Amino acid sequence: MGAVNGKPGGSAPSTYGELCELLRARLPKLAAGQRRIANLLLADPEGTAFRSISETARLAEVHESSLVRFAGSFGLNGYPALVELCRLQLAEQAQLVRRFEQASRHEGPGGLLAAVVQHDQQNLARTFARIDPADWQEMVKLLAEADSIHVIGLRKCFTVSYLLSYLLHLVRPRVRQLVPAAGLLVDDLRDLVEGDVLVAVSIHRYAADTVRALAHAKRRGVRTIALTDNAASPLAEADLTLYVETAGVTIMRSLTAFTALAQALATDVALHLGTRSRSELLTDERLLEEFEVYTEGNGREA
């Protein structure tokens, strides 16, 4: 097994986040078995926190000794050290969720509605707790100052893509949602140039066109932002990535945290732009009135 370096200076990762950074950096160079181990750690840290070495080896289709060597290549003291990093991550998230639940505990009968509320509260707490403030500010700056913004999200993520592009276009010009209708995605991607930003939105199972669009943008020198579900996602190769919790009890995975992020991003972009954003909003209002886009009922604005 080839060596995998630890953090700069040779020290072992001390948090799950640091481990993720190292795994993502080395993933393209790993052998097949090593890659399966890495993907398992990236995609399911909660499961790893409670699995025995034999269970993890079975899921990754490797020998237990391979897990020991894999951990050692990061400067960690065997498989238990990998498990400990995952447990620390889980404990931090659980503490945040408990605080959130105490602050917003709701009354009422159980059942599906209560379960949905509980899951979405947890999704929101975990999603926003994972955001690095420096990454967030860089993301806002990119979205505010890019020449043009292109947003793509397909299938279940289409609505997220639409909402984000709609909100951003309210506060700044040259925002476009990429909709590969009638096989025209290639024509849309041709317009990407350096100075633009591509925002890609996808969760497992990842839409192939979204993944290809992000890879193409990176080759063209376009800055990329990803909203996705975990560090094993192919979209995690983006310049900046936000990981969104999507656990739920409904037919499809929850998009509640995506909606909150889209609203927060657009609002922060508007604040960053200041008077320029205000000018865009005033122009929108004049056009809405001119074209009578909205109607009024009962003497109140619709």
Image (cartoon, rainbow, N blue to C red):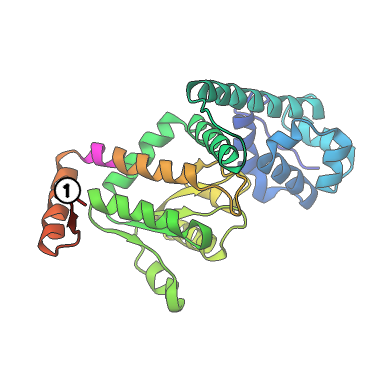
Reply above or below: 7 against 268: above
Reply above or below: 167 against 192: above
Q: Is residue 290 left or right of residue 233?
A: left
Q: Nearer the viewer, residue 237 or 126?
A: 126
Answer with the quarter of the image where residue 231 lies.
top right
Q: Secondary structure at mark 1?
A: strand
Q: Residue at x 69, y 29 (%)?
A: 86
Reply above or below: 34 against 72: below
Q: Main secondary structure of the magenta part?
A: helix
Answer with the quarter of the image where residue 206 lies.
bottom right
Q: Quadrant of the N terminus?
A: top right
Q: Is residue 78 magenta?
A: no
Q: Amino acid at mark 1?
A: Arg
Q: In this view of the protein, can residue 240 be seen by the observer? A: no
Mark 1 = which residue? 300
Magenta span: 269-273
